[in-house]
Image (tube, coloured by chain):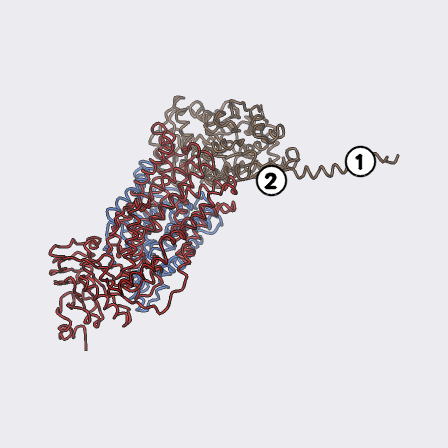
Chain colours: A red, B brown, C blue
Amino acid sequence: MDTEAAQRVSELRAARAETPARASAISLALPYLALLAVAILFPLFGGGYWGVIATRACVYWVLVSGLNLVVGFAGQIAIGWVALLTLGAYTTSVFAAGNVMAPLPPYLALAIAAVVGAIFGLIVGLPALRLRTFYFAITTLGFATIVTQVALAWQSVTGGGVGVPGPVFPDPFASQWGFYYFCLALAAICTWMTANVAASRFGRALTAIRDAEVAAEASGIAKPRLLGTVFLFAGATAAIAGGLFASLQSYITPDAFTLDLSVLFFIAILIGGRSSILGPLLGTILLTVLPEFAAPLVAWSTFLYAVLLLVIVLAMPGGIAELLDFKNRRPLQSNRAIVPRPDLVARLLDAQGDTGTLTLDQVALSFGGVHAIDGLDLKIQPGRVHGLIGPNGSGKTTTLNVISGYYAPQRGAVMLGGKALPALAREARAHMRIARTFQTPRIVGSASVLENVMIGGTIDGRGTFVESLLSLPRHWRDEAKLRDTAMLALSAVGLERLAPVRADRLQHAELRFIEIARALMLRPRFLLLDEPAAGLSGEEIARLATLLLAIARAGTGVLLVEHHPDLIFDICHEVTVLNLGKTLAAGTPAEIRSHREVVNAYLGG
Amino acid sequence: MPLSRRQLLSSGAAAIASTIAKPAIAAKEPILVGYLPALTGPSSSTGVGINRGTLLAVQEINASGGIDGRQIELITRDTQSDPTKAVNGAAELTRGQKVSVVFGPLNSGESLAVVPLLARTNTPQVHPCWVDSLTDPKKYPMCFRNAPTNQQIGGAANRYVVDVLKQKKVAVISDTTGYGTASVNAYAPMLKAKGAEVVYTGNVDAANPDLKPELLRMQSAGAEAIMPWSVNAGFLSRIINTRGQMGWDVPIVGQTTLGSGQTQALLEKPEYWAKVYPNNFRPVCYTPDGKLTDRTAAFLDRLKSAKIEMGDTLLWWIALGYDSPRMIAEAMKAVGTEPDKVVGYLNNLKQFAGVYGDMSFTPDRHDGYPDEQVVMVEANSLNNGAFKLAPGYSA
Amino acid sequence: MVTSIVLSGTAMGCIYALIAVTYNVMFSASRVFSFTAGTLGMIGGVLGSLFILRMGMPIALGFLLALAGGALLGIVTEIVAVRPVLKSLDQHLYVLSTLALALMVQQFTAIEWSTEPAPFPRLFDIPRAEFDQQFWLPMLACAFVIVSLELLYRYTLIGHAFLAIAEDNYAARALGLPERRLRMTSFAIAGAIGALAGFAGGEMLLAFFANAPMLTFYGFVPVALGGMGNNRGAVVAGLLLGLFQQSANFLVGGIFASVAVFTVFIIVLLARPNGLVGSALQRRV
């Protein structure tokens, strides 16, 4: 092993030791432990009535913790989630009271409610995959109304307007404080589970879907499956919360499940801040407790929540979590330089194997009357940099989009090693080790640089969602491996010092290099770059050039769409010039530079 | 003869003793009475009316020295017609405020949730809600109802429709509250048992502005009488208005709120109020020769002098609100505020002289209102808060 | 029965269509859907009842003031809930800000006005007929608005300007169109249209704060089915919705009617997410 590389690796290990996983885990857990301690000791200083409020906060948090993954992490605007609370409350109560069959033990009724809730969570949530944001929000409202109306109409089972008594849990949970500890335990478990998900590749993938959907697709993240999983989970927790709610209220009627409740849950998450567990937890406690301080406040509570929501959206979209994000308040070093390490690139991209060529064969694509690509032939070989240049509107980015699966060619085929690539299968590209960057960097602003890069390696994880939920060993192994690989990728592009920094604090040039690091996580056979030099200084372009050459040397085929002729002519092995969707010229950089038509159409001078 | 030293001393001692004693009495803890009216929301007509009587009674009791020198402090939690808020309010009253007794909730839907809760906290409760299941001397030994039951109310109304008006095809509807739903469920079988044919039942969202579909369906089902059960004045007024707009000449017989001033205010035309027969209570109605009982007349004078508004509500609600704290006060005057003692007293209460009716309880029967006092009246005979008995109504 | 269904179905359909137009006008001006559309409808009814019944104003004055109130709320929506979030990177904040504003207005109305439906004045003092004013007023209002908007967009300069900023925001600004003022005006117009819907439909809907969430949903269905920004599609879809809903109402009854409407809507939307008319998805990469 190269001494320099060895030194680098030990530097890396030292860097990791500065923020060792275990120490940071404890400092992360501290606020939760403090809250838990207060909660456990609460009966000593809180009176009977505040016990009811505290229990209610725990019950609401059970629901909100699951909904947080849907709304806070995945960014789905599910306003009508009270439907699941209603469903869970009625299912538990009806089975415990024996309205359909012989009365069941309350725990069993609660378990059945969880299953029913999971299924309906999926049903209510699935439209999110087909519909635009606002449309989906409206359909969830529709579901909330449907469930309430069904509860009203199905008198034989739900008692209709009369309602049904809530389940009574047996000792030791029958007393007020006993029940409080039961709800507290469930709330604590939900906090632990969702915190585990947040710190797993699934949590990062959810955030990626929310803030950088195309990048998530390019990284191979399958939106339907992931969203389906969180909807199942959120439905189950909501239903369990419903059963607990019914027990707390000791009696439920359809009008207990108002839109106001739904709004409370939703706003608690947004006040708390997205992609956070602690924020929404504090938000839920705040919103549950706030109206209790003054009797008139109770009537105005929904108005207050709405005002809070407006203030947060306008002034502090990051919510409470942003307020508590102390480590991102520390000023960054100015005059930062990006210093890639080409030698580390080789370590990262080792063992490529024989992969074959990426070919475009007479590909054509039109948008209406515009021929975006008109019979294009392209051949990208592994280990070589292929430049694609041309005036604006010549079809460069469209070509890239066809290769990465955003558009299906109307004629011709895109082939990898002789086999045609399935059209429109964007996520599949990642599995074929075809990675790309974007014209405008698609970064998750609220996540750290390291997390952004780790998103690129999502498909390498082996552990399932449940294993992450329960913090099982394979989850930790995945995380360690992803973390190490991501640090290596960051070091390779020269940004390892910025690993813990929130990505939206970074400069444009740094974001471009982060995208490359993320793409490298896939250990790509082919790397497609969409104008990576745009907005970079001369020095940075030079460094980019060394990086790209290193990547090619390691065996990756690079397709470089660019406007900077210097970069193209410096590093490309072949260049194709496009004009109006057709190949104007193709050849080595020297040939292209002196080609008369190219000079006339594009290069000038 | 000048006062002897002993006399001086003893009178001085008495004077000192009385000054010491007075602060002690004045510093006596108030009696906390929890109160759960629905002062706002769709079912607030009961709360608004009852509240006036309650406040008046508490004021009077306190003005005349309270109960053994202790003032009654009424701790009010508006349930907003919402069972959930009623439960929260009840929890706060018992656990937070530690009240000695609870009066309310005033609507059945809210009581369905609160009664079991108060039973668990061993708090004596007096409520005027009608749904049958809301008292049960075994399950809820501390809960008393100082009002009629749905059986009593429905019995009187059904008797009027079937026996007096001689209509056999009946449409029974309600709103979607617990009270409405329970009432329809109770009354439909009662009607069938009387040999009537229930051609239509329905639970309608009270906020629905357009009741034409409902009435059209009733009409095509052949209904000859409409029996609505709801305390929502808006809802009831819309039923009456739609019947008038359709020009459909069938009697409306049902819930007492049909006759309230609130409902009257929402009618499109005063003539729409004809052939509307709500239930009410004999003590607060005009006798056939147009007179009120002495007790009621005195109460009316009392209300007038206290400038209490009557025109937008029902007299019997105000009377009920007036009677309830006085009944509780009587119990506490007799046996003190210990829950078991209060319950014990109420369990043996005979003929408590209320304005709107005399209450009696036994350990096996916690429904205090006498059957024979439930009557049907004619809505548009409203005069000074009281009604005339409905036509054809034999005493 | 059939006459009742047709009359009330068409009338309700026109009200829903007008709310849909409110959504569309706001959308055209800002590429944003605002939750306040349904609230505007509610405000029209409440203000009408407030000014005419409670405060005793003459009907014409109450009408104008109600429209003005709607326009004002429209402008407030633009300034408070739309403009600040348009420039943010997060495209979906507008859902939250408009939701917050709509909730604030609804709750305020519920607490200060009433939680119960209050009567709405009868606008023309003529006796009730089969084809009563409560039916033809919404139809008249809908026809008037649709025709006026067509004329506005097609024949006036300001109408062309509205279309320009809707079509290509950057080009319009580059041409020197006062984008901000145009957007505010659009929202004011939308506000007035929403208030008109509530006012014209006041006798059918009554002055009730809970009309807001109801109109938010039912007013959006024609938008979703007719295509975003497509006013003609909205009218057709609105009428279909009104007729379907009232048929269910009259034939089956309230609870099942609303479940039926929701279910059909969700199914249709899942089948055709871009509406029955359909439009291409924009380039995302």
Q: Nearer the viewer, residue A382 or C48?
A: A382
Specify the subunit that label 1 lies on: B
Residues C144 and C33: in front is C33
How many callouts does the rendering have?
A: 2
Tag 1: residue type?
A: Ser
Position of B356 compared to B175: left or right? right
Q: Return the residue at label 2.
A: B307
Helix, strand or loop at mark 2: loop
Q: Which of labels 1 and 2 is toward the front? A: 1
Q: Is residue B214 left or right of residue A584?
A: right
Question: Which residue is under mark 1?
Answer: B11
Give me the C-alpha separation between circle 1 and circle 2: 45 Å
Q: Nearer the viewer, residue C124 or A376?
A: A376
Up the image or down, B183 lies above or below A495; here it is above
Q: Is residue A280 left or right of residue B94?
A: left
Using the image, name the chain to which the residue with label 2 belongs: B
Please state which amino acid type lies under the numbered disc 2.
Lys
- Of mark 1 and mark 2, the one earlier in the sequence is 1
Q: Position of residue A502 (x, y in %)?
A: 35, 59
